[in-house]
Image: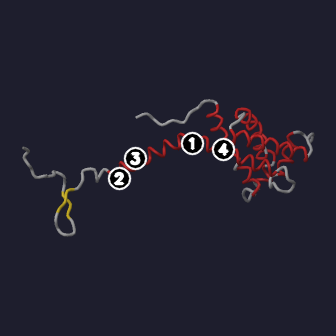
Amino acid sequence: MSSARPLTSSAPKRHTAAGTSAPVPSNTLARPAVVVARVESGLAGFLTRYSIAALRISLGLVFLGFGVLKFFPGMSPAAELAERTIGTLTFGLVGPTAALLLTATLETVIGLTLVTGLFLRTGLVILAGALVGIMSPIVLFYGELFPAGGPTLTGQYVLKDVVLACAGAVVAAAALGARLRLPRE
């Protein structure tokens, strides 16, 4: 035979609208903190697994898009800047049409390697070289891009390339073996 004992709780009581009291589950107060910690942990795991690949693919899409536009006359807002930059860097040895075709080809190849992940290291080497040309207008045409009143639209266009360079550095670090990982607890 078993003896029946009344169920009692040592948990704190909460008052209901009817004026009676009911036990408060012991985990109720800690629950929001646990939920937040689980969400943070899940998000950190997700970002650790997928953020570098997402950065690589999105950077590739940017290069692919800008590269393909340069194949079509009048479609790229940076065409004239690319022609002038390469012309200046090569001391006029490369004409405007060849400069634009070279830029379009390089940017398209960089974009394809980043999007697909195929020949990634080769694409990153090309990107490193291309970044010299991409960033050089800041030095070559500083007065035009950044007059006394502030940066022109073209100057802002070139400045955003600093972000692309940093993104390329993160993707390159990962391609060379660096790993994003969560701290061990």
Image coords of residue 84 (percent x, y): 86, 48
- Quadrant holding the C terminus: top left
| Label 1 neighbour load within 10 Å: few <14, some 14-19, many 20+ | few
Provide the residue designation for mark 2.
Answer: 32
Q: Earlier in the sequence, mark 4 or mark 1?
A: 1
Is 164 displayed left or right of 67 in the figure? left
| Label 4 neighbour load within 10 Å: few <14, some 14-19, many 20+ | many
Pick the residue in front: 119 or 158: 119
Q: CA distance from mark 2 to mark 1?
A: 27 Å
Provide the residue designation for mark 1.
Answer: 50
Residue occupying the point 70% across, 35% down: 120
Q: CA distance from mark 1 to mark 3?
A: 20 Å
Instruction: Describe the element under mark 3 as helix, strand or loop.
Output: helix
Q: Amino acid at mark 3?
A: Ala
| Label 3 neighbour load within 10 Å: few <14, some 14-19, many 20+ | few
Image height check: is 141 above or below 18? above
Residue extending farthest to the top is: 177
Provide the residue designation for mark 4.
Answer: 57
Q: Amino acid at mark 1?
A: Tyr
Disc 1 or disc 3, which is closer to the eye? 1
User: Which disc is residue 24 wearing?
Assistant: none
Q: Amino acid at mark 2?
A: Pro
Pick the residue in front: 112 or 126: 112
Residue extending farthest to the front is: 1
Q: Earlier in the sequence, mark 1 or mark 3?
A: 3
